Image: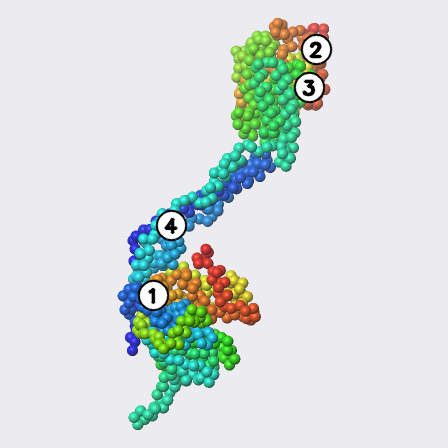
Amino acid sequence: MLDEALRSKLDQIARRRSLVEILAAAVHGLVRFCVAFIVVRAVLGLLTGGGGLLFAFALALAIGAVPSAARGRIRHTRLSAAKYADRLLGLEDRLATAVEKADPNLRPDTVTTWLFADAARCAARLVPEKLVPISLPPATKWLPLLLAMVVILSLPIFPRGLPFQLGSQVLEKAAGKAEELLALAEQLEELNDPLLQEVIAELRRVGENLRDKKLPAGLAAELVSELEKEMQHSSLSPGDEGLEAGPNLAGLQNLAQRLRTIEDRHGLPQGQRISREALSRYSRNPESGAGLTGERGLPQQGRGNEQQAGERFSGDMEEWDEDGGYPGEDEMGFDYEEDPSGSRSGRSGEGADEEGASALPGESGWGEDEEYMSESLEQAVGSTAGSGPGGGEDGSFTEPPDGEREEAFLSGRWQEDGSLFTAPAPLRSAAGPDEGGSRPRETSTTIYTAGVEGAVDQESIPLAYRLWVKRYFEALEPDSGDNY
Amino acid sequence: MVTTRPNPGASSAAPAAPATRAAAFIPTTSFSSAEEVKTVINHIRQEIGKVFVGHNELVDEMIAAILAGGHVLLEGVPGLGKTLLVRTIGRVLDLSFARIQFTPDLMPADILGTNVLSPVGSERVFHFQRGPLFAHVILADEINRATPKTQSALLEAMQELKVTVGGQSYELPQPFFVLATQNPIEMEGTYPLPEAQIDRFLFKLEVGLPDLDELRQIIERTTGAAVPEARPVIGAGKLLELQALVRQVPLAAHVRDFALRLVMATHPQRAEALPVVKNYVRFGASPRGAQALILAAKAWALMAGRFNVSHEDIQRLVLPALRHRLLLNFEAEAEMVTSEKVLAEIIAAVPREDGA
């Protein structure tokens, strides 16, 4: 029968061949993966400006693994090992024939017995370590280079905005729009308010990202769209005269909120998001000249509630359409009754506060376009009126349709009737700090009239509201003083 | 008289195979070791080499054919020593030898024998007078000069190892070889061997011209005073034992399959046939060709001192075993394409391992 030493060596050879084959399959699979990833990633990266990383990875993984899996594992037996040794050592099929004829159930004839003896003599020539060295396949030498290329191509190294890239026009447009945003940041900086520094930095960073085409085309397109809306409706666009009246806090908050929502949807890392907290901090800081705190910005009219301005406040966004459209008149619950006396007899659930918003001329102010009003302001407005779309008649808040609920810091003050007054406020109050936050009504009305006339002329005010806004402020015109 | 017994290696469960002489006459081997087999075969080579100079490969192929129990067709021009080689082999193997010169007027009875009326006591009875075919080694010289009728008389003898005359069969002595010669250049007045006849030769060997050294030795040995003479090495019994050992040589499945793929590759009807086969071959090798190839390879392996058939054995013997079994078409003749060329391409194209 087959020699025991020969059998043992052949088994060793079979095991080592299996090992080498597995090793080779792994290396070749890895090389296939790397090559496929490099090609796919390079093409996709160039076309999309760095997109398609996961797709390239998945496709390369499939290309690398599928051939190996489809081929399956070749099972190396004693017979295959014998054939291998015969071929390598020039044994003219001695070992393979001996292994094949070594059937314990058959009695070997004379020549087969001689064959077994002949094969046993060959066992001395079998050195499994030499016949099947455990070594990496030649393709291994390319692996470091390929892996390095894979790592490099995984990094965001692809330029955006190249002419042949998908969405390059969007990025070009975004780059142009970024200049406006950067200009806005510059003008904010000229205000030299330390509390605005963080906001400025955020705006500047977003602007630079857009300018340098570092953001994906989809995100850039959305950002541009929102920037256009917000800067137009909130009068944040830097004009020739600059932000002479100071930035609109509501606009900034809206801008931050919109950008944050978009960035969240695009999954940008935390470090690349605009910090709304920075805006909130700015708006609720008692030392700020924004005037939203009762101490400085507006006349202190007492506190009818223990809840202080700047406390954490919960509200809902029920009145805001998901698609960003303007709410209809009915939806707004704007129940205005014209009163020739000019007295305030209407219920403004959307933010028309009885004290009058302290928007300066040129600022859109409160509620002229609710869609772009910041979430926090709208919540506050709902609570103030108690009957607006954002709140019930009893002042309670209804849950948003999708159950989402968000907390935000608000600035404002509690009025005598127990409602919270909050409104977009100028960064610099019309009333000087020495005036104790109070001013003559005639002065305010004049200011408002100029602002309203300017605002009404803007197309950004929905047509449905223009008449109401105009009438409202006409009703506030100073008269003999009987109604004051 | 040679004692015979059934082949011990034949399985009783196997389907009944056609009776062959090797299966029917296998003596118990007296060879005690592999070395003894090698020694005997080498001794045969040496003794033949004393008389027949050169052509070592031809001699080896002749020995392989004899060990495999096959007949050989030698083709070559006159004067190359074909007859000498056959005679020497008969002498070395210590076998009876008969030479039959084939001529157009040679009749079957002239080689097989005939019933003659002879007196036995007071009666006259028919008695079978054995012809020259009743010898171990038959030299059928210029076999293509006899008529097909006479050539066909050899069919039964070569395949069945017996002759039938007057309804009576007579066994031929064992071992029995027909070593036929034919002249390839004198085609006038010849009768080419029919396919059935030529297929019964295990090998067709071509005897070439000797080179200068060989020719010098031939002259020295044959023109001197002392004529070298070969001595018998083994007798018929030992030769039958060797033939039995040849059949015992193991054949691995993958080597067998390689041989079968080679044979199948000669068939132009197959879809995967090579272009050269499709273009120039009318009929490929028969299953008898595969049998011849395997048996010859076993003998060749034993002669090489191995106890298994290798791929190299198969490749080496494709030409002698298959060249006369390929029937080429007119295009091949017109373009001077020989069966050797076709087979060479087949050998180069067929892989050793299936799918390799």
Residue A231: horizontal and vertical position, in percent?
65, 22
**Between disc 4 and disc 3, whose residue precedes?**
4
Pointer 4 residue: A131
Badge 1 amino acid? Gln
Tell me if mark 2 has few (under 14), some (14-19) or many (20+) residues whose alpha carbon lies within 10 angstroms of its own: some
Q: Secondary structure at mark 3?
A: loop
Distance from disc 1 to disc 2, alpha carbons, whole Å, reads 124 Å
Q: Chain of mark 3?
A: A
Badge 3 amino acid? Gly
User: Closer to the camera: disc 3 or disc 1?
Assistant: 1
Badge 2 amino acid? Thr
Distance from disc 4 to disc 3, alpha carbons, whole Å, reads 83 Å
Residue ID at (55%, 40%)? A40
Let me know if residue B26 appears in the view. no
User: Closer to the camera: disc 2 or disc 4?
Assistant: 4
Pointer 1 residue: B248
Pointer 3 residue: A239
Q: Quadrant of residue A442?
A: top right
User: Closer to the camera: disc 3 or disc 2?
Assistant: 3
User: Closer to the camera: disc 1 or disc 2?
Assistant: 1
Decide: marks 2, 4 in contact (CB < 8 A)? Answer: no
Residue ID at (53%, 68%)? B337
Q: Secondary structure at mark 4?
A: helix
Is residue A81 shown above or below A146? below
Tell me if mark 1 has few (under 14), some (14-19) or many (20+) residues whose alpha carbon lies within 10 angstroms of its own: many
In this view of the protein, which residue sits in the foreground, A345 or A15?
A: A15
Decide: marks 3, 2 in contact (CB < 8 A)? Answer: no
Distance from disc 4 to disc 1, alpha carbons, whole Å, reads 31 Å
Q: Quadrant of the C terminus of chain B?
A: bottom left
Residue occupying the far bottom of the picture? B122
Tell me if mark 4 has few (under 14), some (14-19) or many (20+) residues whose alpha carbon lies within 10 angstroms of its own: some
